[in-house]
Amino acid sequence: MSTNWVTRKRPARLERRIEFSDYEETREFLDRAAELSESRGYYPDMSFGRTHVSIVLRPEDESDVVSEDMLQFANLMDVLVPAARLTN
């Protein structure tokens, strides 16, 4: 998981905001993220604007712990980020 994710404790969650150069890049990321969510059956909270996406990963079982599954999903989301955006 990249250091761009922020771990929150109350309630337990992982958060990340990604900046993109234009809407097309944002849209491509969202499409890939949707495919990942469908394949994993896990649906993060995502909000977006023209050139940014905010992601919140929460425990599925409403526990108060950031799980290994959440960390793995964060890693998979990182793979979807264009290389130029990994520092955002």
Image (cartoon, rainbow, N blue to C red):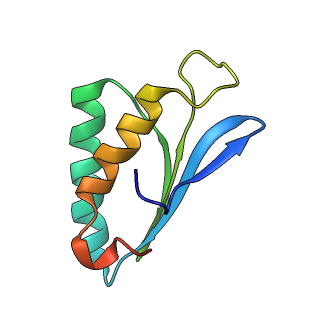
Q: Residue furthest right?
A: 10
Q: Is 40 located above or below residue 45 in the figure?
A: above
Q: How many marks?
A: 0
Q: Taking 38 as reference, is 54 left or right?
A: right
The quadrant in which residue 27 appears is bottom left
Q: Is 31 located above or below residue 59 in the figure?
A: below
* Residue at horizontal 24 percent and vertical 39 percent from the top: 36
* Residue at horizontal 64 percent and vertical 26 percent from the top: 65
Question: Which is more toward the observer, 10 or 37?
Answer: 10
| Residue 44: percent from left, percent from top | 46, 39
Q: Residue furthest top?
A: 61
Q: Taking 39 as reference, is 5 left or right?
A: right
| Residue 76: percent from left, percent from top | 29, 44
For the C terminus, give its image quadrant: bottom left
Q: Is 72 located above or below residue 88 in the figure?
A: above
Q: Is 10 located above or below residue 48 in the figure?
A: above
Question: Which is more toward the observer, 63 or 26?
Answer: 63
**Visible in this render: residue 86?**
yes
The quadrant in which residue 79 appears is bottom left
Q: Taking 52 as reference, is 62 left or right?
A: right
| Residue 87: percent from left, percent from top | 41, 75
* Residue at horizontal 34 percent and vertical 71 percent from the top: 86
